[in-house]
Image: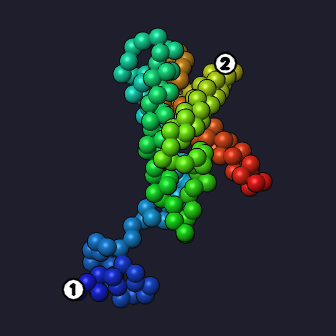
Amino acid sequence: MSIGSMSKLKNNTNKKEINNNQLHPYSIDKLSNIKPGVKIGFMKFWVAGAAYFLTFTAFQSDPLDLMVVLYLILILGVEYIINKVIVWMHNDKYPTLSYLPHHVNRKSILSLMMTAAYVLVMLLTSYYFIEFLLDLGVPSIGMFFFGFENKGNDPITFGLVFVLMDWIWLMIKNAIYKKK
């Protein structure tokens, strides 16, 4: 099989030529059909939930100290994981730059400061929104797993609420940028 035939397998528009029982190592996988917004949303959920999990299970300290550690981990996760992947995913077919929390030059210290402000807003709104829901009697996802007598926050609930607050942030930011 020559190099030209590999290109033919990958970019084959006539699917009848390929035998379905044959392994196609260069064919496009099913995950490529998932829209970038879903991938980015899942990545934000995962980073927020993982940061919450690492902070509140690894350390046994004062809750305010844990929130500061969570804040610092989220700043690093958003700036150096989420924002980098969003920029790398951007192309002509699927523009992803609208999913960025801000449009400050990525190579400046101002970008890190803007990410810190964004994470502070997301952390505080997520935390107080979850506390508000718990005070209303709405159970967190962790309460379903560990019993309703264990009232409190958990990584899955925090990640989902973080993504919800991020979605609200992006709607406001994109509405402001469209007016300019």
Q: Secondary structure at mark 2?
A: helix
Q: Which mark is residue 135?
A: 2
Q: CA distance from mark 1 to mark 2?
A: 65 Å
The image shows residue 62 at horizontal and vertical percentages of: 47, 11
The image shows residue 1 at horizontal and vertical percentages of: 21, 86
Q: Would residue 61 be found to the left or right of residue 35 on screen?
A: left
Q: Secondary structure at mark 1?
A: loop
Q: Would residue 41 be found to the left or right of residue 136 on screen?
A: left
Q: Which mark is residue 142?
A: none
The image shows residue 4 at horizontal and vertical percentages of: 29, 87
Is residue 2 visible to us here?
A: yes
Residue located at (68% from left, 42% from top): 168
Is residue 146 visible to us here?
A: no
The image shows residue 121 at horizontal and vertical percentages of: 62, 31
Could you classify mark 2 by the number of other residues whose Cα lies within 10 Å: few (under 14), some (14-19), or many (20 or more)?
few
Closest to the camera, between mark 1 and mark 2, is 1
Q: Which residue is mark 1?
A: 1
